[in-house]
Image (cartoon, helix red, strand yellow):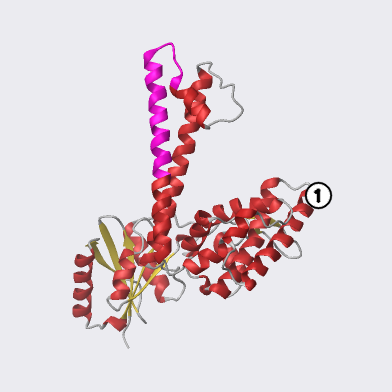
Amino acid sequence: MKKVYIGIDAHKESNVVALAFSGQGEPELYGKASADLKAFEAVLRRIMKKYELLKEDIALCYEAGPTGFVLARRLIKLGFECIVVAPSKIPSKSGDRVKTDRRDARKLARLFRAGELSGIHIPSVEDEVIRDVCRGRTDAVDERSRTKKQLLSFMLRNGYRYKGTARWTEGHMRYLRELILADPAQKMVLEEYLQRIDFAVKQVERIDDQMEKLLQTWSRKPLVDALMGFRGFKQTAAMVIVSEIGDFKRFKHPKQLMGYLGLTPSEDSSGGRRKQGSITKCGNGHARWMLVESAEHYRKPPKISKGLSVRQEGLSREVKTISWHAQNRLSKRSYKLAMRRLHPNKIRVAIARELSSYVWDLAQIVG
């Protein structure tokens, strides 16, 4: 049976298409096509007609990037085989420094035909919506923090120091709003900073409300609720982890999840020498960051706080047992690593790596 492997170099406005037929020589360049979905479907129909192919005879692939998964979802819905390939998983020859759209499309088609490409997980539309909202919240929080730092630098640069005990309280904000500066232009700058902070604060609140609404109808809500029964995971952290990872069942072992999160140590071993380095940082950086943030809570001795107790209401005994076991083990491990005088960041990463295995266990139970 004749089969064609299609490599797509996807861009915002256009896609470059190359064809590699099974059992034949070098891939051939088909040409450039519009990135519009309907226009690209027309291109596929022309290819099928020209080479007398059925949908089952066609397999497509393209590199993950800013164009997302819209194209892949559409092609799969139409009945085509399509995978999205992580750039870091595409084999490359040393010394090959020539990169063009045409060469990239041919390369994808050739490697796909040879079986050297594997697809990444394509999230469902529902999961991607939640993920986008969570990432939007992260951006809003970053903007709020950045503006606050800029305002503090502005105040320090002009010799104004707040005498209170804590910043960004009601008292501190009142001090900033009532402050009289020597020059009206500087007062205008101060007001601009304050307005930006107010906008960012309200933006975070609006997104939090939206996340709460989306959670109620999300198919993965049971897993989010269960994860909130862990120390260090409130609603935001739990939704970020679950939306970024999506289907936990695709990881057959916790170590696969650790690798996906980029929490496994890099290694440079040869002969009898074995040398491990820093973590690989491959895979999903958003989930890794949130997991490391949550791992910070395990520095303290095991404890069921009032807030955690409320979040655990209605959860099964099995989930609570996993949560408590995680607290005991990770707190003990954190203490031992601290006694070895490891850098705090290294301790957090080590705890995050082991914490991911508990999250994996939880997902196998709750789904």
Residue, disc 1: 339
How far across and how far down the image is residue 243, in percent? 46, 62
**Residue 160 at what x, y percent from top left?**
53, 18
- Residue 293 position in % (x across, y down): 59, 51
Residue 57 occupies which quadrant of the picture?
bottom left
Identified at 48% across, 70% down, the residue is: 247
The magenta segment is 178-204
Q: Decide which of 137, 81 is in the foreground and name it.
A: 137
Answer left or right for 53 relative to 279: left
Furthest toward the top, the residue is 182
Q: Residue at x 41, y 59 (%)?
A: 130
Q: Quadrant of the N terminus?
A: bottom left
Q: Residue furthest bottom?
A: 1
Q: Is residue 352 visible?
A: yes
Which residue is at a point 41% across and 35% down the rendered structure image? 198
Say left or right for 316 vs 39: right
